[in-house]
Amino acid sequence: MGKIFLVIQREYFSRVKKRSFLLATILTPLIFPAIMGLFLWISVGEKDGFSLRIIEVVDENDLFFLESSEQYAFSFSKISREEGKLMVQEGERFGFLYIPKIELSKPAGIVYFGEKNPSMSLISTLESSLKRTIEEQRLYQSGIDPNVIDAFRTKVSIQSVTLDNAGEEKISDATVNYGIGFFAGIMIYVFIFVYGNQIMQGVIEEKSSRIVEILVSSIKPFQLMLGKIIGIGAVGLTQFLIWMLLIGTITSIVMGYFGLQMPQQQAMEMANPELGLLMDDSFDSNNIIQVLQGIDFVKITLMFLFYFIGGYLLYGAFFAAIGAAVDSPSDAQQFMLPVTIPLIIAYLGLFIFVLDDPNSRVSFWLSVIPFTSPIAMMGRASYGVPAFDLILSMGFLVLAFLFTTWFAGKIYRIGILIHGAKVNYKTLWKWITTS
Amino acid sequence: MEILKIQDLSKSFGQQPALSHIDLVVPRGVIFGLLGPNGAGKTTLIRIINQIIDGDSGLILFKGEPLSSKHISQIGYLPEERGLYKKMKVWDQLIYFARLKGMSASMAKEKVKYWLEKLEISSWREKRIEDLSKGMAQKVQFISTVIHEPELLILDEPFSGFDPMNAEIIKNEILELKDKGITVVLSTHRMESVELLCDEIAMIHKSKKILEGKLSDIKRKFRPHVYQVALSPNGTQMPAEWGIHRTSDKVEIQVPLNGKRPNQLLLELMSFGDILEFREILPTMEELFIQQVKSHPHG
């Protein structure tokens, strides 16, 4: 055991101390907040940088009223259409909205003149506010008080609540659950590939530089393989934890700095006032907090760590065996298929079946079969997984990990000592059966 | 007492026998030459002694006990195909190998320091292997083999990759280790170093052992019974088959014994002039090697 620990130590520190590890670990989580920050900076700068944009409005009906906002001010006047256009041309006004005499039932001929193409948000703001005025006017003409209509406008939203065995109720939200499953599944998928590859590279390095013969005269090949897998896994886990910490910290700093710690809804409302109107009560921030409170984060985190590590170990042994069988990374390609295919099936299964319906039969099998379960089960995690499924899946994963490691160990211990030989699946099978 | 005793060891890879019924005894404190042409089975034998692979049948005793993993720390191994971690520093690397052989951290540090100073390479301790020349790396490699003070040292072609200067240093280190009582098994194709270093040898050919014993005994056993003689001639005619080589003041000849005793031969030779030199010709290892391989076409 002491020797495995030495190998783990070497694998871990030789990677963690590298400059490239430090760079990747620090820069990767900086990229997302940096991009977000950049956009926020630009948009904030835009607001501060420009003075109010004045839009000249000519309403031949004397009917409409447009409320000025932070960005746009509306100046009503009685100038002619040509005069208005001239004002825009000369840069005196940002834009010019011309509303001719219109029939309320068939409003037509409203034109916006601008030096630049107007933004979507400006046009939709103008449209919706004109629309509302016309609608109200028409209701009024039909003898209906718009206030009465307002009173009848009903908003409907369905709140979904999950019940557990004890009858405890939790407010759930499919979007949040989807997000958690999506994120966790992808993390595990990427992690297995990136760090599995590092195992393979490491084994190839030891094999091709012939260190391995010295190593295996001091330590059993199986111990060496296990030490390498665990050591590199620990590097991955370290990197992941640092990322989580950094992303969390930086995101909150960035958001805090720009004073934008507002609920999502408000941001959406800004972009589209009509949407805001519709979503008014159904999606308030209170609700999100309630949804988040309904999710058992401790359980999900533990599950994530289990499948994160389990999936990595399961495939790590395969990557080690592949590295041992070949002389150079370019030869490894031919053996990658048995590793890649189940991973891709798991990845596609996550999107097509599991996130779509976590309780379907396909989702069950995907999350129980060990070669797909680390990714697929995370898609089900936040929806709540029955204890039976979970125990079955975890048990299988542990058994499969022991099996693949034993199996890979057989290939590994022979492969590392064989150089320059043409290795195919037939030779691999011979190694397994003869050792 | 012997440090290593191998009894009836066999190993085959599929249908291909690599070692068949090998018996071998390596006495303590000697330099033991393990010889044989390429593909004879030397590397397989060495790997089995190092417990890298297992034999199919037979027994290996290390200091009288069946060889097991507890003996790993008492064996040092320098494989023919060898390498180091290119990105690792000399110091870290040596400590790692020492620890893998079961040394404590403090002991490992002390020993690495000792060896770096001994081979006068202390200034490289913070260098990465990739920044060293091949010869420098070989020195580090040699240290990694002996760092844990093994009782049995197995060196497979230890001089390959060394320039003559460094080869000399390593040769002296090997002799010094022998003086300390360490047993060295030396596998090499360089017969001149066998001649120079080995006390005992064993020869393997086509998976079988064809020769074993003290180097001096073997040489005597296979001597051609011919004497190298130098004399200042008195004019008497010598038989032409003696291979006469004349210089200005002496004649050198090679005289077969032809069943006579050496003293008898000497007496006869005295009639041809004054004897300056009289010495039995022993076969060189080179000659022995070729002769043995040829006379055992099927191992």
Image (cartoon, coloured by chain):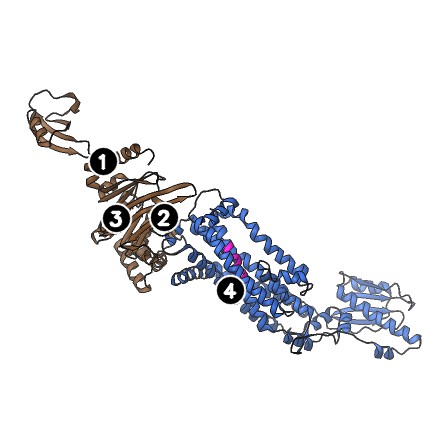
Q: Are marks 3 and 4 in contact (CB under 8 Å)?
A: no
Label 2 and label 1: CA atoms lie apart by: 35 Å
Asked if badge 4 and badge 1 are on a common chain, one would say no
The residue under the point 46% across, 42% down is A421
The kind of residue tagged 1 is: Thr
Label 4 and label 1: CA atoms lie apart by: 62 Å
Label 1 and label 3: CA atoms lie apart by: 22 Å
**Please, which chain is the residue tagged with disc 4 on?**
A
Q: Nearer the viewer, residue A241 or B281?
A: B281
Which residue position is annotated with label 3? B26
**Label disc, if present, on residue B284 of the rendered structure:** 1
The residue under the point 38% across, 63% down is A2
Q: Secondary structure at mark 4?
A: helix
Instruction: Relative to B241, say whether A21 is above or below.
Output: below
Q: Secondary structure at mark 2?
A: strand
Q: In blue, which chain? A: A
**Please, which chain is the residue tagged with disc 1 on?**
B
In the rendered image, which quarter contains the C terminus of chain B?
A: top left
Asked if badge 1 and badge 3 are on a common chain, one would say yes
Which residue position is annotated with label 4? A237
The kind of residue tagged 3 is: Val
**Label disc, if present, on residue B57 of the rendered structure:** 2
Range of magenta residues: A309-318
**Please, which chain is the residue tagged with disc 2 on?**
B
Q: Which residue is most to the right?
A: A142
Earlier residue among tags 3 and 2: 3
